[in-house]
Image (cartoon, grey):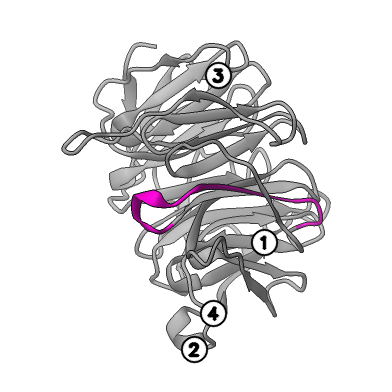
Amino acid sequence: MRGVLRIFPWVLIAALCYGAEWRVVRQDDFVRNDGIEGDLLTVHVFKDGTVVAAGSNGLVIRSTDGGKSWEARRIKVEDLGIIFWGGFFFDERTGWIVGRGSRGFGGAPLIFKTDDQGKSWRRLQAPRVPRLLDAFFFDEMNGWVVGETRTLIRTTDGGQSWKVISAARARAGEMRYNYDAIWFPTRKEGWIVGAYGLILHTSDGGQTWREVQLEDVVENLHDVLFVDEKKGWIVGQDGVVLRTTDGGESWRRVDLGEEDELRSIWFASEKVGWIVGDMGTILMTEDGGETWHEVKSPASSSFFAVSGRLNPETKKFACYVVGEFGVVVKGEGEVK
C-alpha cells in the first residue's frame, strides 16, 4: 500500500429515509435519576429486535421491546467497579464483552461470555495483560481480543485458555500504542487499528501481522469494519474516515466535513450504515457510503457505539446509538 488517495468533497445529502424518526429511548443519568449510572460503550442489535449494551461501572442493559423498557444489572468483580470497553456477537445468542477492573493499574483484564442473548454472563479466565478494548470471534471457539499497549490475545477453545500474541506496558513518558478495534472480513484477512494512525494487517489468519503505513494518517483510529471481503471502513479522531474498495490494497481518505471524534461505524446491509461520534454526531448512508447525510440528533451526548438491523423485505431499519451518561438514541425509518 502506498499512501492515501485523498478524494473530496463528499457531499452530505438530504435524508432519503421515508418517515425516519430519531428519538431518545433511554435518558441520560441525570434525567433518569434512578441510581443506575454509567457510560455505554458497546451495543449489539439482534434480528429479533433485542438490544444489549454495556459500559462503565460494570453496567449491562438489555431491551426486548424496542427500547421502551430496559433491564439493567451491574457485574462486579471483587467489589471493584469495572469498565466494558467493547464486545462482539457472532450469532443470535453467543457473545463476549471485554474490559478491565478500574482500580488503577491493578485492575484485572476481564472477558465475560453470554449464551442467552445477554440475559446472563459468566467470567472467562483472562491472561495478565493490559486493558482489553475489543473482540472478534469467527465462531464459538476461535476468537481474538485486542487492547492497550499493543495487546493481542487469541483463543481456540472458546476462551478457556488464551495465547498472548503481544502485550507491552508503556513506561512513564512513552506513547501508548493501543489496539482499539479488530475485524476479520474472512478467516485469513484481518485488520487492527489503534493509536496514532496504527493499522495492522494479516493475510494468514493471524499467524503474522504487518504494520501498514498510510501517508499523513496520524490520528487515533477507533473502529474498523468490512462490509464484505473488499469494502472496508476505518473511523477515528478529528473526523477521519478511511475507505477501501479493494480489500485494503489501497485506502482513501474521505472528507465528510466532520471535525469531531468519530467513534464507531456499523452497516446493517451492503448499502445502509451509520457512523457516530462526539457532540451527538450521527451520519447515515443508504448507498454503500457513496454519499452520507447528517442525522439531526435528539441528544448532544458523545456517542461511542452504534448497531442496527435492516429488514430486507420491508426496507425498514432500526438503529441504536449509545453514549455517555447511559443515553440511548434509536432511529427508525424506511429506505429506498
Marks 2 and 3, the one that precedes in the sequence: 2
Report how far apart the C-alphas of labels 2 and 3 lie in the structure. 47 Å
Residue beneath disc 4: 36
Amino acid marked by disc 1? Val
Give SS at disc 3.
loop
- Report if the CB atoms under discs 1 and 2 are less than 8 Å apart: no
Give SS at disc 1.
strand
Report how far apart the C-alphas of labels 1 and 3 lie in the structure. 30 Å
Determine the residue positioned at 39% across, 63% down.
302
Q: Residues within 10 Å of mark 2 (few under 14, many from 20)?
A: few
Residue 163 visible in the current orientation: yes
Amino acid marked by disc 4? Ile
The percent position of residue 45, horizontal first and vertical second, equals: 69, 56
Determine the residue positioned at 54% across, 62% down.
78
Residue beneath disc 1: 52
Give SS at disc 4.
loop
Report how far apart the C-alphas of labels 4 and 1 lie in the structure. 16 Å
Residue beneath disc 3: 247
Q: Most extreme residue toward the left, as rendered?
A: 173
Q: Look at the picture and state if 258 lies above or below 72.
A: above
